[in-house]
Amino acid sequence: MGQTLLLSEQDVHDLLSMEDVVAAVEKTFQGMGEGTVVNPSKVNLDLGESAPYPPYNGFMNAMPAYVGFADVAGLKWAGGNLGERKKRNIPYCSSLIMLVNPHINNFISVLDGALITNMRTGAQTAVALKYLLNHGSSQRRPIRLGIYGAGMQGHMQTRAIATLFHIEELRIYDVSRPALERFRADMQDVVPGRIILCDEPSQAAQGDAVICVTQSKDEFLKEAWLSPDTIVFPMGSYQECEDGVLLHADKIVVDHVEQTMHRGALSKLVAQGKLDEHSITCTIGQLAAGKVQLERRPGERLVCIPIGTGAMDIGCASVVYQRALEQGRGQFFDFGVSSATQPPQN
């Protein structure tokens, strides 16, 4: 009988750094561009997020992938809930990741996915900026940021970008003033430059990149607030920017073309027939793999939408799994004769 390694959120926290996640995300993007990653679109289970029934104001996504650099397959089962979870003051997201040995299709690990999800979402932006703003160079250049949302994802975006860039100014807006104050206290040691708490949303729409990571269903980011050279990252589950920001973009870069057609910032305009797959300039994976060279002329607006893929979660989870084996972390559980055996040696 084989065994499956069970890993808690604390295990993940202890075994995985943001630098690890950024490196794994970059490798995964490169694999997507090179064709060594298999990543079907998410399968969405609407639990009242947009449908009237069932009335739970939530959703779950099944996100399978195979990641070549780790030679591992898996699935993340994840979702968000603005109903009972919000009432009980517990985090919006919940998730588990299952890793599979693709040689024999046995489950080698089950681990908490919430922390990995939060970390890799920040890392996606950081890696995208490396190729959009820094031409793939690892040299730490100064960057000015505007961020909407001072919660968990605002923190993770900042931590991830700080691993690749020198943040000389960060403007942050949130509807909650206490959240802004907590953000400044938490990020003072991460951001070497100024952290500016914005009283009005228009004040945060300045910088080399403007990042929206909120749960808002309002199109609050106005086109008139943005300078032409700013890279816009509308990353919420809903459309956080007004239509013109997207319709008047000179270039649109995404992580997964098919997914962005039916979820996130582009989905409404796609459903209205105003945007389609031909509106996409390229993917982050194509840039990371060197398949596409993105030339930007002065004054061009660029929108980047890394909506999130299972491949990122599986790639990061594989790092945690290997570290856990090396350090003797976690607990093995025997599900029976069809459960996991030892993974192939890389």
Image: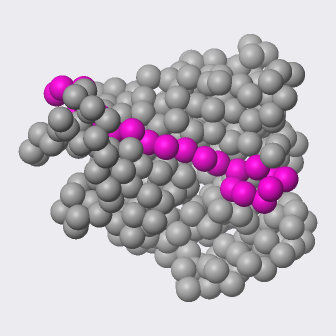
Is residue 312 at least partly visible in the picture? Answer: no
Residue 209 image-quadrant placement: bottom right
- Residue at horizontal 62%, vertical 67%? 155
Q: Which x, y percent locates residue 252?
A: 59, 35
- Residue at horizontal 44%, vertical 42%? 97
Is 88 contained in the magenta span? Answer: yes
Is residue 144 at least partly visible in the picture? Answer: yes
Applied colour scheme: one colour
Q: Examine the rendered structure and indicate whether residue 249 appears above or below residue 41.
A: below
Looking at the rendering, in which quadrant would you find the C terminus? top left
Q: Examine the rendered structure and indicate whether residue 135 appears above or below residue 204.
A: above
Q: Examine the rendered structure and indicate whether residue 314 appears above or below residue 49.
A: below
Specify start and end residues of the magenta stretch as a single range.
85-108
- Left or right: where 326 falls relative to 189: left
Looking at the rendering, in which quadrant would you find the N terminus? top left
Q: Residue furthest left?
A: 345
Residue 269 image-quadrant placement: top right
- Residue at horizontal 29%, vertical 63%? 329
Q: Residue furthest right?
A: 200
- Residue at horizontal 34%, vertical 26%? 38
- Seen from the viewer's position, the closer of residues 32 and 113 is 113
Q: Which x, y percent locates residue 51?
A: 82, 22
- Seen from the viewer's position, the closer of residues 24 and 128 is 24
Please tell me how many numbered marks the rendered image carries.
Answer: 0
Q: Which x, y percent locates residue 171?
A: 73, 71
- Left or right: where 231 falls relative to 12: right
- Seen from the viewer's position, the closer of residues 167 and 100 is 100
Is 97 contained in the magenta span? Answer: yes
Q: Which x, y percent locates residue 190?
A: 54, 80
